[in-house]
Image (cartoon, helix red, strand yellow):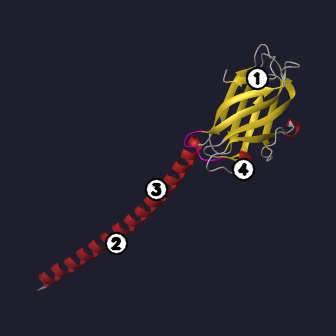
Amino acid sequence: MAHEKNKGMMGIGTLIIFIAMILVAAVAASVLINTAGSLQQRALTTGGQTEQAVATGAEAVSVTAQNASSDHELEDFELMLRLNPGSTEMNLNNTALILDTSEDSYDYEYSGSGDAWMVSSTTGTFAVEYVKRGPEYERGYLSRGDVIKLKFNVTTPVGENQRVRMKVIPRVGQPTLIEFTTPDVMNDNRLNLWPQ
């Protein structure tokens, strides 16, 4: 009888250990599932932000300038832009424009003036003209289907055969870089500077 009682006690002990192992495994599995879910959510969020940062940006179409006929120097510039394929809309209020020449550097921000022709560069702003409005047009944004001109001027005119660099920098996304050299002879009132 004592032998059977010992076997029964061992069986109960084994059962208790087995139940304890199942409980520990369940708790560990719960922690792993919660951690995996949290990591998946973070990965999706980070992936979306990375995709937006990589895809968002503007494509430069052309750069033109005016006022070259009288003194062979450029003061008023126009930069035509459209969205990159797959890009989300760009808020122009959160977009910076930088222009560098061999003599000066200028920083511009959106004036919010809509279709105005020109804004003084002393305030460091650029005006926007919507050349084409896409199906998702909203003033102050560069949206799918939009084609816009950024219009700005410089306080120190840009002369002949000068290196010019323009950069459009959105708050989120890739900057757009345009580099060109002004022509050796500038006689026309309106010049196409880029692409050459």
In the image, taking residue 35 as reference, residue 140 lies left or right, namely right
In the image, taking residue 57 as reference, residue 14 lies left or right, namely left
Identify residue for label 1.
191
Residue range corresponding to the magenta coloring: 84-90
Residue type marked 3: Gln
Packing grade of label 3 (10 A; few <14, some 14-19, many >=20) is few
Q: Earlier in the sequence, mark 3 or mark 1?
A: 3
How far apart are the two marked residues, 2 and 4, measured between alpha carbons? Answer: 60 Å
How far apart are the two marked residues, 3 and 1, measured between alpha carbons? Answer: 53 Å
Nearer to us: label 3 or label 1 = 1
Identify residue for label 2.
23
Q: Residue at x 20, y 77 (%)?
A: 11
Q: Residue at x 43, y 58 (%)?
A: 36
Identify residue for label 3.
40
Residue type marked 4: Arg
Q: Earlier in the sequence, mark 2 or mark 3?
A: 2
Kindly check if marks 3 and 4 are in contact, taking CB atoms under 8 A apart as contact. Answer: no
Q: Residue 113: image x %, image y %?
A: 81, 46
Give the overall secondary structure of the magenta segment. loop
Residue type marked 2: Leu
Q: Looking at this view, is 186 or 39 the one in front?
A: 186
How far apart are the two marked residues, 2 and 3, measured between alpha carbons? Answer: 26 Å
In the image, taking residue 86 as reference, residue 12 lies left or right, namely left
